[in-house]
Amino acid sequence: MPTDLQLTALDPVFREHPHDVLDRLRAEDPVYLDAPVGRLFLTRFKDMKAVLADRSLSVDPRKAPDTPRRRALMQDVPPEEFQPSMLLLDDPDHKRLRGLVSQAFNQRSVDALRPRIRDIAEALLDALADHRSFDVIAEFAAPLPILVIAEMLGVDPGDRSQFKRWSDARAHVLNPARTPEQRAELAAAGQGLNEYFARAIDARRGCRGADLISLLVDAEEKGDRLSAREIVITCNLLLVAGNLTTTDLIGNGVLALLRHPSQLAKLRAHPELVPNAVEEMLRYDTPVVQVGRFALEPLEINGREVRAGQPVTCSLLAAGHDPAVHPDPHRFNIERADTTHLAFGGGAHYCLGAPLARAEAQIAITALLKRFPGLRLDPQYAAKHKRVPVFNGLEALWVCAT
Ligand code: HEM
């Protein structure tokens, strides 16, 4: 049976063929005890849905038993000094921090942003007008979400290459096997982001705008129990959380279309299918492959006992391919009637940016297909996935424009 790193993209076989092992686990041992790390690894949709909604499981590593994995997540900061973002906080702090920014990410606010997202996508495609072949990731899928969130936060989109480097380095927070070099990059990116946002926050003190940083500074000054440090941490999270993930959604989605010409043709003929196609992309090749929790008290999952303190990993990728929910789960079908997935998690920590990610992907895919009617995979291209645990995305996606 596989264990720990063999169940992440650090393992070359899992990285390129995850479903061989996930299907086997789901069929033979859906609440699998990954003994060397003591965690339970879930592969059934139903179990994960229940776990994500269950408040007797926590996200806060300070409440977990002291293990190397926990220390890695906390970057070796002592628990009393560790200051998590909402992603790693339970209520009431989680609710307070999420509540302050949630309005900016709701469906209405995101719908109002759509024309601007479209302009950004079109401008990126304009720059590719004379290219016969290009890398969809580097030229389109990576810059788009960074430019959008930079504008929402009110920071200079011109700093986008720096944001991209910081976001990529921060992904190693979720890599328990990071090398000393990656560890140094992670720390430097954390410091760079903190200093960058501390300056941006100071600049807002005298002069508010209509951006998200101004909204948070306003909340702090109105006494909404928000500390200056929490504003920095929240800005870091917002800048980083949606970048790799949305890039991977667009990249994985375009790859799936180019590998399934009949689906691509159908989408070109019926652009109204784009929203459903994006849900199918989220299900089929989920960008965030797993999320973790640990039990605050003894409980049971699908008849298996869970000890207090025991870590539980939900394989969101496996959830999207559970035959009990999706008939013929490994088939990519943009007209699938039920695209239910857990790609955005579930329960209290359900992705705050889901409406934004959906809008970006829908707009990006529509614009790309319209601009390049002959888009196809570069015959020289061989898909290679990134070697980072938790995220599932391509290193590059080379296409021919005609
Ligand atoms: C396709 C793109 C995206 C995917 C697949 C994705 C996935 C996820 C998942 C699975 C979680 C839950 C983590 C957990 O339960 O432990 C989450 C949380 C979160 N996401 Fe996303 N995300 C995406 C885009 C975005 C964007 C664009 C933003 C904002 C700019 C964003 C902001 C957040 C935040 C703030 C949380 C924490 C919510 C909380 O703890 O209450 N995400 N995301």
Image (spheres, rainbow, N blue to C red):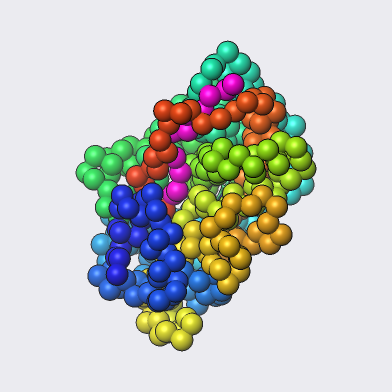
Taking 187 as reference, is 37 above or below it? below
Is 230 or 192 nearer to us in this picture?
192
Taking 318 as reference, is 128 above or below it? above
Drawn side of residue 177 relative to residue 136, left or right: left
Is residue 349 inside the magenta stretch? no
Q: Where's residue 342, x and y in %?
A: 57, 61
Is 251 or 268 nearer to us in this picture?
268
Is 38 or 132 nearer to us in this picture?
132
Q: Which residues are magenta?
A: 391-402
Q: The C terminus is located in which quarter?
A: top right
Q: Is residue 5 visible?
A: yes
Q: Where's residue 45, x and y in %?
A: 54, 69
The residue most toward the top is 130
Q: The N terminus is located in which quarter?
A: bottom left
Q: Is residue 204 visible?
A: no
For the point 50% across and 77% down, the residue is 56
Q: Quadrant of residue 325?
A: bottom right
For the point 54% across and 34% down, the residue is 141
